[in-house]
Amino acid sequence: MAGLAVLAALTGCTVQTPDGEGERRSPVHIELPSSTPSPGRTPSGGGTPRSAPPSDDDKPRAAPTPPRVLWSRGDTGRDVRELQARLRQVAWLFEGPTGTYDEPTQRAVSGFQGKRGLPRTGKADAVTWRRLLAMTREPGRWDLYLMGGQPADPPDPRCRSGRVLCIDKTSRTLRWMVDGRTVSTTAVRFGSQGTPTREGVFSVYWKSRDHVSTLYDSPMPYAMFFSGGQAVHFSADFAARGYAGASHGCVNVRDEAAIARLYAQVRNGDKVVVSW
């Protein structure tokens, strides 16, 4: 019975005495050893408790560095011209290249970025440029100056004296030159393979402000005839379609204001040089 009393004391139970009356005792708390110390307790051996090292998920992360912007609205130059030429290759830009990062270029860059899951900033950053490079080929001179505005080649030596319409088929430019000085330069296009623009030295023999072709029944404003039916004149088709079309041998000018100024300055008898 003494043993039962001891066990009851240890377990907190009630022990029945022989006369049937139970003697109730207060339970005794027994602390069992544990391998994990309770919070706030010092593990055996002393020392200060240490918290677990933070995981990688708990560490603060630095914000990603945005890619470097190469070109944006308002920038100009040859690099912008190449950007525009490559955007034309993937059908995101349909005008130019102009060499000026304008609103159409910004919209084209934004559209290209959005299609490829990049932030639609409209700015040509390093990531956007790498994606565009991977999808396009190196543009040639034709691509870079498709819509005109190309730098003119050095003038033909025959253009260096007198009053001359100096026309270069390679750079597709017309220089108006007086005594070796370039007064103005404008983009031009020429005849097709079947109706080529003649090359050589000619002179303006007739000017017709509101001329209409009797052969093709098409308007030829500001026409300056230099060889048979071939003339320098404004072309609405050139203004609308660029180099996608061609003339029937004439030298087309797309800038109406430029050809109007030129028409006012050129006289009958002025020299015309057409060369490669």
Image (cartoon, rainbow, N blue to C red):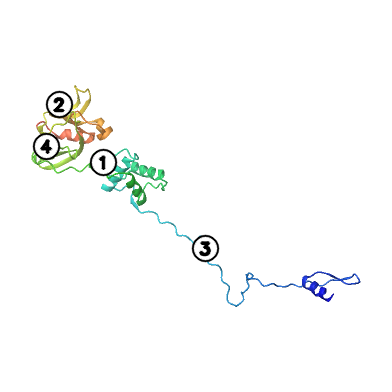
For the N terminus, the image quarter is bottom right
Does 186 appear above or below 59? above
Q: Distance between the residues labelled 4 and 3?
A: 79 Å
Please tell me which residue lies in front, 116 or 154.
Answer: 116
How far apart are the two marked residues, 4 and 2, measured between alpha carbons? Answer: 19 Å
Kindly identify which residue carries mark 1. Answer: 143
Q: Nearer the viewer, mark 1 or mark 4?
A: 1
Q: How far apart are marks 3 and 2 (CA)?
A: 84 Å
Label whose residue precedes the other's in the sequence (1 or 2): 1
Within 10 angstroms of label 2, few (less than 14), some, or many (20 or more) residues? few
Choose mark 3 or mark 2, whichever is in front: 3
Count residues near mark 4 (Cα–Cα under 10 Å), then give few for <14, some for 14-19, many for 20+.
many
- The number of numbered badges drawn on the structure is 4
Q: Do the residues labelled 1 and 3 touch (CB within 8 Å)?
A: no
Q: Which mark's residue is nearer the viewer, 1 or 2? A: 1
Decide which of 7, 270 is in the foreground and name it: 7
Distance, label 1 to label 4, CA atoms, is: 29 Å
Which mark, by number, is residue 229? Answer: 2
Using residue 258 as the reference point, say whether residue 102 is left or right of it: right
- x and y percentages locating residue 210 in the rendered image: 20, 26
On residue 55, the disc is 3
Disc marking residue 164 = 4
For marks 4 and 3 on the same chain, the one whose residue lies earlier in the sequence? 3
Query: Looking at numbered disc 1 in the image, what kind of residue is underneath it?
Result: Asp
**Residue 148 in the image, given as x and y percentages of width and height:** 23, 39
| First along the sequence among labels 1 and 4 | 1
Q: What residue type is labelled 3?
A: Ser
Percent position of residue 169, x then y: 17, 37
Frontmost of labels 4 and 3 is 3
In which image quadrant can residue 197 be found?
top left
